[in-house]
Amino acid sequence: MAATIVAERLTKTYQVKVREAGLRGALAALVRPRYREVRAVDNVTFTIDRGEIVAFLGPNGAGKTTTLKMLTGLLYPTAGRAAVAGHEPWTGGAPFKQRIALVLGNKQQLLWDLPPEETFQLNRAIYAIPVADYRDRRDELVTLLGLGDLLDKPVRQLSLGERMKCELAASLLHRPEILFLDEPTLGLDVNAQEAIRGFLRAYRDRHDATILLTSHYMADVTALASRVLIINQGRLLYDGALDALVARSARTKRLELVLGDGVTEDALARFGDVRYFRFPNATVEVPREEAAAASARLLASVPVADLSIQDPPIEDVIRRAFEVDTAGGEP
Amino acid sequence: MSGARPAGGSAWRERYAALIRAAWLVDLQYRAAIAIWLLWGVMEPLIALGIWWSIASGGDVEGFSRSDFARYFFGVTLVNQLTLAWDAYYIDRWIREGEMNYRLARPINPVHESIADNLAYKARSATLILAVWLVAAAVWPAVRMPVDPGRWALAALAVVLAAGIRFLNGYVTGLLGFWTTRATALMELQFGLSLFLSGRIAPLTLLPPAVQTVAGVLWFPYVLAFPVDVLTGAVTTPAAYVRGFAGQVVWLVAWWAAYRLVWSRGLRHYGAVGG
């Protein structure tokens, strides 16, 4: 399968003005401004195949959005190259932009005072979509996203979740083959998040689209992405399957227990690290390779109604990956 | 999979129609605010007219009679509304608050949205002001313009060129937001200077020679005083027409070149707000 997104040693550095606090600092900065170079993205290399859904993970300021903005042609890289749908993003112009969509969770394109249908109409003209195609696609998006009666309400009267659904519809009318989504479920309630995820899967399946998304919500990642890119301080730490990351980084397993009568927290402590205890439920973390033995000992010595062995939550796994990198990366 | 046509002439017509339609629909939501802005735009020249009207009570001022002042400032009101450009404020905000991002991801240069916005705004304001002017001219002979289709055509051309210069001037100033957070302050400064240098407060010939000299080497007189003078008949000789139109073309080209430069450099410099 041909790679549809290629990033090769992609690097972006910013000049950031250094200013000390206080009036003196402000005056000094005025007379002799000093700059510091910040590497927002540092030698990042990866490829994404057509039809893949890949999640881009990292703490705030890690370089996720900067990478996304380079791949969509908004930013010029300081070094490196990229090819998206066969185009160099920052020189691809209109033919390139007709093939992609950029959805920003925190900055929407919907015309605030008008019903979403007006933004759809505007995008129909901007993307030069033939009228018949426009009707078909709009109807498909309205059905998939459940927009029904939202189309004629002013955007300002819609809930955040409804707005994001309309935003997605507006962004996908030109049927882009590559979607770049920056925090598409930001601030949404659980139902709305689930609706968006379901829609994105359906869109990918129907149109063989490629999706690269950033998110802070692990549920987005586990539900959508088979592959994750983890970035921290501008550097790519991990590129691979989510399962493999868990197997590599998770040194522990969790024993999820439903306890029988009379078991105390202290009684569990000798089997491992008690992470949660609220009778009758408890979670005990044990070294990965000892999970089976610890379970057997536990079952033999305390009354247990139910026991399951789980991987630690993906949040913990990723946090650990960042901690290892930060500790190793400091001078 | 991407089923879009390559954008030809008809696609561009549709784009502009859609952009203008959206601008009008948004305007309709802000009727009161727009009426206030329009009133503000009309008040300034009317106040200036009131002052000059009373100064001219004892006879002509440097060859300007009361009727001349009335015609001049009615002309200023119309031409000002037809050439006014707010773009610096929008562009600066788009850049600072990240609204430029989704615009840059679209297959059209954001400048088209601004041009369409200007066409929508100007068509609306001009219609209103022309209507007011027709009513005023019916009852007040001083503000009647001589019926002279040739001159009106030249005035229309001068207004179009002036609107182009003023648009590009504002747009380029807004684009300085790629580098500085003071782009709107620079626009305010130019508004202040234009009060004198473009002829908003007084016909240029009434200003001190030094001010006229400064104005003559800048674009300000070409965006207001010259089109107003063409409209009111103050430009009489072919040489004066040629000088005026040549000045307009030079400044239009200069600001166009500035736009090309600032846009391409600005995009390279763009930091795009957000992580």
Image: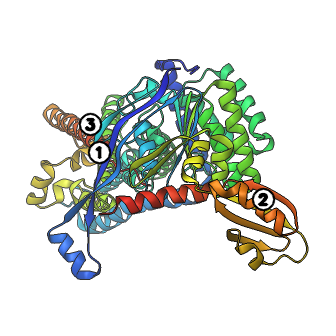
In the drawing, does residue A110 fall left or right of residue A304?
left
In which chain is the residue bearing label 3? B
What residue is pinned by disc 3? B260
In which chain is the residue bearing label 2? A
Q: Where is residue A224? Give x, y as percent.
A: 66, 41
What residue is pinned by disc 1? B266
Residue B122 in view here: no
Under circle 3, the secondary element is helix
* Distance from the alpha carbon under mark 2 to that under mark 1: 66 Å
Q: Which mark is residue A296?
A: 2
Q: Residue furthest bottom?
A: A23
Under circle 1, the secondary element is helix
Do the residues indicated by labels 1 and 3 lie within the same chain of the protein?
Answer: yes
Amino acid type indicated by mark 1: Gly
* Distance from the alpha carbon under mark 3 to that under mark 2: 74 Å
Residue B128 in view here: yes
